[in-house]
Amino acid sequence: MSTQPSSSRILLLFAHPSQARSEVNSVLFNSAKQLDAVTAVDLYAQYPDFNINIEREQQRLLSHDIIIFQFPVYWYSTPALLKEWQDLVLEYGFAYGKGGDALKGKLFFCAVSAGGREEAYQTDGFNHFTLRQLLQPLEQMASITQLTYLAPFALFGSRTAKEEHRITRHSALWTALLEALAKGELDIAKARQLENMTSYFNEQELNQ
Ligand SMILES: Cc1cc2nc3c(=O)[nH]c(=O)nc-3n(C[C@H](O)[C@H](O)[C@H](O)COP(=O)(O)O)c2cc1C
């Protein structure tokens, strides 16, 4: 089993422009904040005017082993501030290109919610592509920057998740995943291959 080194620091970069109406991501972000291993950054709170502090963001990246982008899927992609963050922070000579290996070997994945149902995210479904396929620009960003890309952790049908009582289980999976990552216990080869990291744990493991 390929695992990470024991005891890892996790940088959670959260981008949600209308958190007052959030039913899913706000719950996950708040539970992640409780974990010692997690540095939880609310990007829209820190940069409401999109004036990103590149030096600070690069230092944060350097001082963590695992990078997570957390966001609601907007137009099959990230909210605008997270795209701006990529455009500004992942500079030539830092994240890619000559001498640009600051991110080499760190783990990276996306924790996302999508309004569409899982069956819509299929080749023959309403959205024509799986969510993992639609997130391929981020997968390729990871490849160019030498990050190790893991499968997205995704909740589908997010706008009805609360009334359908699906958030508690999703949140438990999220906490279990973060704790396994922090302790260096995640099977990386398995996590790279999944379509959705929510299927990493079986019920038995979750209830332990
Ligand atoms: C501007 C905008 C664009 C959206 N685009 C998509 C989309 O492309 N695919 C999708 O499944 N849901 C889309 N949604 C729905 C959001 O993903 C959904 O509202 C979010 O996951 C709910 O999470 P929250 O409860 O944390 O706000 C969009 C919502 C907004 C406001």
Image: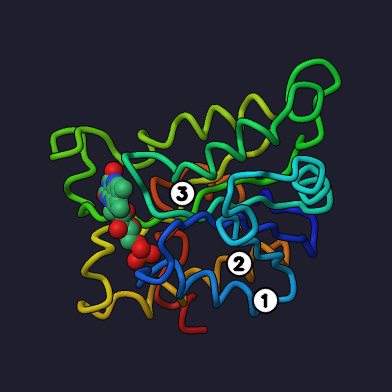
Q: Nearer the viewer, residue 30 or 85?
A: 85
Please identify the quarter of the rendering in which residue 158 is found.
Answer: bottom left
Residue 181 x/y as whole percent: 66, 62
Side of 83 relative to 5 (left or right):
left
In percent of width and height, residue 132 lies at 39, 40
Q: Relative to 102, is 163 above or below?
A: below
Q: Mark 2: which amino acid?
A: Leu
Q: Depth check: give the residue in front, 74 or 11.
A: 74
Residue type beneath disc 3 = Pro
Which element type, helix, strand or loop, lies under badge 1? Answer: loop
Q: Which residue is mark 3?
A: 152
Which is nearer the eye, 90 or 137? 90
Who comes first in sequence, dot 3 or dot 2?
A: 3
Residue indicated by mark 1: 35
Give the Cα distance between marks 3 and 1: 20 Å
| Amino acid type, callout 1 | Leu
Residue that badge 2 annotates: 178
Tell whether circle 3 marks a residue whose Cβ is less than 8 angstroms from ligand 1.
no
Which quadrant would residue 33 be assigned to in this image? bottom right
Left or right for 48, reference 172: right
**At 33% across and 39% down in the image, what residue appears?**
76
Percent position (x, y) of residue 23? Answer: 35, 72
